[in-house]
Image (cartoon, rainbow, N blue to C red):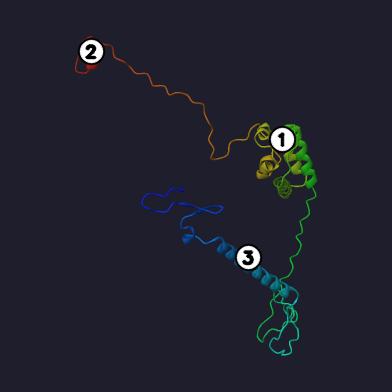
Amino acid sequence: LQAPPPGGKSPLLIPVDGGFRLHNFLKRNPSAEEVRRARKAEADRKAAGRARQVRSESGRMSGRTTTGTPAGTPDGTTVQRPPVPSHPIPSHTLATLELPPGVAPRRQRAPKAPKVEPPEPSGYPAVIDAYFAAYERAKGAKPVFTTRTGKAAKTLLALMSEAEPVAAIGRAFGDSWFVSTSGELWAIAAEPNKWRGTAASTRPPPRSGTHQIQPYSPPTAPPQDIPEDDGDFGAGDDWRAAT
């Protein structure tokens, strides 16, 4: 790098006191002194900006104090200004606001009345107890009580007399098909006439629109009379049988 290149050009590194100097470096780059001056000017500019921001925030929060000779104070007295609020503060309320003529006040919405649940029917606990006992006796486990179960009990009490729902539950759980397929109280309330006053059958007939599945049996062809072969090949005989 210190050897001069061919063509009479200067080498890349030129020996100087204390080290080397790059050829033509200062023609394309700033010197160290210029870099230090630029960095100091940038630091002073940022410090002044931060100082202005601090003064502005303190004046906005606790009132701005101005010294010198502002307008209206030729003697240079100090002027104390009130703090600026962060949001506008109304000087009136809705109760004291005067509406212009012809404008009706806005009607206030009436508060909602509390929701009152209707009382449970008198036979409701007996129906629930009978259902839990029949379910646990038939399936060996306690049923899961849901909102649908409570609505089914109220439906049975609305459609039957007070003692009939308990008897209908007993008839339903005496049916093996009902216990194996459903066993839910809402299934009894969906068909109350099915379990009212009559003994339950072993299996109720299928509903309309359903089809019974029959076991598959392959079709059998009807027997056919095959004529005896006389040994003569005629016009009515199949030529492929002769080959």
Instruction: Tell me the residue at 34%/18% (across/down).
Output: 224
Residue 82: image quadrant is bottom right
Q: Nearer the viewer, mark 2 or mark 3?
A: 3
Q: Which is more N-terminal, label 3 or label 1?
A: 3
Query: In the drawing, what numbered circle is on residue 208?
Result: none
31 relative to 128, above or below: below
Near-viewer residue (227 or 132): 132
- Residue 66, picture quadrant: bottom right
Tell me if I can see residue 68 in this picture. Answer: yes
Q: Secondary structure at mark 2?
A: helix
The disc placed on residue 242 is: 2
Question: Secondary structure beneath disc 1?
Answer: helix
Residue 73 point in image, percent of width and height = 72, 89
C-alpha distance separating marks 2 and 3: 119 Å
* Residue 43: image tag: 3
Q: Nearer the viewer, residue 92 or 102?
A: 92
Q: Which residue is at the front of the view, 3 or 228?
A: 3
CA–CA distance in space, label 1 to label 3: 91 Å
Q: Residues within 10 Å of mark 3 (few under 14, many from 20)?
A: few
**Residue that badge 1 annotates:** 173
**Image position of 159 with respect to 92: above or below:** above
| Element at label 3 | helix
User: What is the distance, in whole Å, between disc 2 and disc 1 at their CAs?
Assistant: 73 Å
Residue 80 as seen in the image, left or right of residue 217? right
